[in-house]
Amino acid sequence: MENKKLHITSLNALLNAAQNITSEAERTLLIESLKQLNTTDDALEGAILFLEDHNWNIELLHTSTEHITTVIDRKKTKKRADSLGKIVLKYAAIFMLPLSLLFSYYYLNKPSAIEKWFIEEPGLPNYMADRGINKWEEPMQAYREGNYAKCIEQINALPIDINNDTILYFGAVSHYKMGEFDRSLVLFKKLRKMPKSVFYQDAEFRIGFTLYQLDQLRDSEASFRKIASNKNHSFNTEASLILENLFDNK
């Protein structure tokens, strides 16, 4: 790593460079090279976006290449929409990679607490509305700041049906983050009755965590098992890994 700028052309090259870091100078060189890099490789671009969002913590890439490749192969896009109109993509496929990489990092370190396996919901982006003031901006700002009580208060005050899937989902996640698992489960279960909702699979996945937090371990395992058995489910791989590592299902 003697050059002033590294030429990283793929995710594998990035992982190799990250694994071979032996000094702070090499770490700094790699980070600066990535900051200047323009790439059309989705996987590499996703990894860079991940690092940007996590303060360039290169150590988060130190995981099994096999598991990373498995998750990358399952890159997915998800669209968020509410009953009042269309909103933009919540995250593009390149952003799903960073979430998967972080999730893989947690799995391979086998934490004992369910919370360590939880994929954080970053909230809806600021540019959802086509024009004018976006009604979701204030509650999402509160959500991103970790003020979940304020987020719940603001979304519940919106002139929207309280059974709107966006309200239900972020209300459920906020209650979960506040440790109010009973209320969170009620809202997630309402979403589970909306199979056409863009939040359906997210809610179904998080129900397993909520049940676990409520010490309903058998139901939690059954929830993850149902997802793991559905190859078309967005969280099929993640649920399978939870069963293997958290419930010791080999």
Image (cartoon, helix red, strand yellow):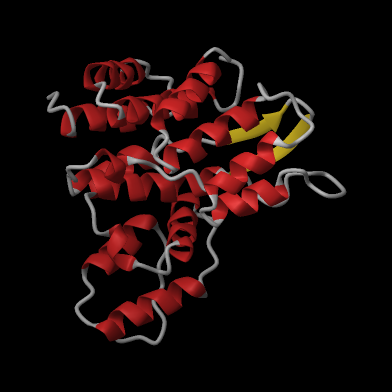
Q: Position of residue 56 (x, y in %)?
A: 40, 69
Residue 204 seen in the current view: yes
Q: Position of residue 144 (x, y in %)?
A: 56, 53
What is the quadrant of residue 243 in the picture? top left
Q: Is residue 177 above or below residue 220?
A: below
Q: How many marks?
A: 0
Looking at the rendered image, the quarter that the C terminus falls into is top left
Front position in the image: 76 or 6: 76
Front position in the image: 220 or 237: 220
What is the quadrant of residue 235 in the picture? top left
Q: Is residue 186 left or right of residue 78?
A: left
- Residue drawn where x is 35% and y is 50% of the image: 102
- Residue at the extreme right of the image, as rendered: 132
Q: Is residue 163 left or right of residue 190?
A: right
Q: Position of residue 145 (x, y in %)?
A: 55, 57
Front position in the image: 166 or 44: 166
- Residue drawn where x is 44% and y is 43% of the image: 178
Looking at the rendered image, the quarter that the N terminus falls into is bottom left
Front position in the image: 129 or 171: 171
Q: Is residue 9 above or below residue 178?
A: below
